[in-house]
Amino acid sequence: MVLSRIWSAFIIVAIAIASIKYISSGNYKTIFNDMVVGKGGDTVQIATQHINTLSPVIKDSLLKKADFTDSRIHYKTDSLKQNVTVYRVQESDGVIGTSETAVKICLGLIGIMTLFMGFMSIAEKAGGINLLSRFIQPFFSKLFPEIPKGHPAFGHMLMNFSANLLGLDNAATPFGLKAMESLQTLNPNKDTASNSQIMFLCLHAGGMTLIPVSIIAIRASMGSKTPTDIFLPCMIATFAATLSSMIIVSLYQKINLLRPVVIAYVGGISAIIALLVLYLVQLSKDELDTFSKVLSNGLILFIFLAIVLGAVYKKINVFDAFIDGAKDGFTTCVKIIPYLVGMLIAISLLRTSGVFDVIIDGMKWVAHVANLDARFVDGLPTALIKPLSGSGARGMMVDTMATFGADSFQGKLAAVLQGSSDTTFYVIAVYFGAVAVKNTRYTVVAMLLADLVGIITSIGLAYLFFA
């Protein structure tokens, strides 16, 4: 019911804001067309600032001529005062294009899903998932008291969390969907989210990642002198978001986290991550890239090898087991199409109607009235869009870096915000859609609260490390 109300609110608010803009200003006469078929040429003012605050490439270009265009960013400068007015060309699909994109996303998942679901089927029949379940059971049994001992859901969830930690998005989604299906077998009310499903999804959406490789790569490509300096803030922010997810859901479900087993596991995991961080912060950008690729890709191959060897040892018909699981991967991808289309068109309406511009302008006004440092507001578009769209948030992060510089406070904050949380509404649509759960209960509220913790932590860390 909560998700239904939020989805309805997205559509109503987007159309209402668009109508107000259409009536009140002649500059938005194409806004309804943009919402339906997309927009690709409108410019929106971002900020007016001194030329010295911009990235070196843009600064040099502006010193040579009055106007400068950099793909999606336009700059106009006063040659005497050197104050620069920055405009961003907004490009986004309308509801028609977004519907097609949603289907393409699901079709693109088919290959990955069939691959990993096939290997998961082999692992289950060979007993590998049960082995993982026994390993993590002492800890997970406290967080998931409704799951019986030795249930394969424990192993599936551990695989998902491990893939997330290593930044293996392609593997994390199949593992996560398999975990949701396992939890659904224990769910007495099939159309209502169970406590275990809510806890799992909120922990998953915490997005704890060891190395934000893609963000580091983007920063390097945009001329950052120290592209890896956001690594530690991202790590801390994602840890805070994941821990807050655990606490928030535990309060809802009245789970006591102050148990020796829980404290020991959380403390042990924290200690291992801290030791890894101490090692990784000493590496250069190239060394960090190499370590990440070897660790993540090597681990995937090791898992495949271990599964096949285990199946051969147990005398399992490996290929037939793979085919059985692969079939489930295909049907799962088809099943989530309506849920993903519904969620993404609501998000598209929010983006094309200018709702985010209204929010950002309001936050800047509040910051100025309260006499606060308003630089953090320029990084917030990434955080506002991230729960709705991963690609949209990535675009906002790139725009912020292009506008203010990859090594500016705003650019670094946007990078940390990009890595501090997951795409909440996308995750809800895909994971609950895969098991046909309609009543998500308090999942949205819990996940958004965790996102808020991640955003506040990211802002605080940005001022601590970069101000």
Image: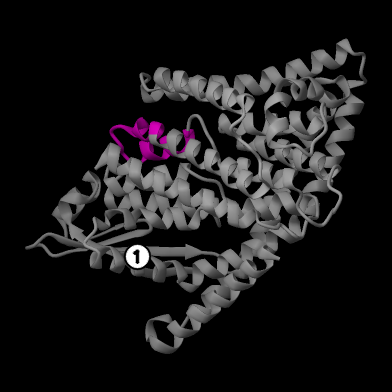
Identified at 83% across, 36% down, the residue is 326
**Residue 145 image position (x, y, % from top left):** 75, 37
Crowding at dot 1, Cα within 10 Å, few <14 / some 14-19 / many 20+, comes out as some
The residue stretch that appears in magenta: 212-232
| Residue ranking furthest to the left | 80
What residue type is disc 1 on?
Met
Q: Is residue 445 left or right of residue 146?
A: left
Please identify the quarter of the rendering in which residue 51 is found: bottom left
**Residue 208 image position (x, y, % from top left):** 54, 36
Q: Is residue 320 left or right of residue 199?
A: right
Q: Mark 1 points at which residue?
A: 363
Q: Is residue 251 magenta?
A: no
Q: Which colour scheme is used?
A: one colour
Please identify the quarter of the rendering in which residue 99 is found: bottom right
Q: Is residue 213 magenta?
A: yes
Residue in the foreground of this view, choosing between 306 and 87: 306
Quarter of the picture containing the C terminus is top left
Mark 1 secondary-structure assignment: helix
Residue in the foreground of this view, choosing between 292 and 77: 292
| Residue ranking furthest to the top | 313
Q: How many marks?
A: 1
**Residue 431 image position (x, y, % from top left):** 71, 49
Identified at 29% across, 37% down, the residue is 465
Q: In this view, does 120 lie above or below 336?
A: above
Residue in the foreground of this view, choosing between 270 and 8: 270
**Residue 192 image position (x, y, % from top left):** 79, 56
Residue in the foreground of this view, choosing between 264 and 410: 264
Q: In this view, does 433 lie above or below 94?
A: above
Main SS, magenta region, reads helix
Quarter of the picture containing the N terminus is bottom right
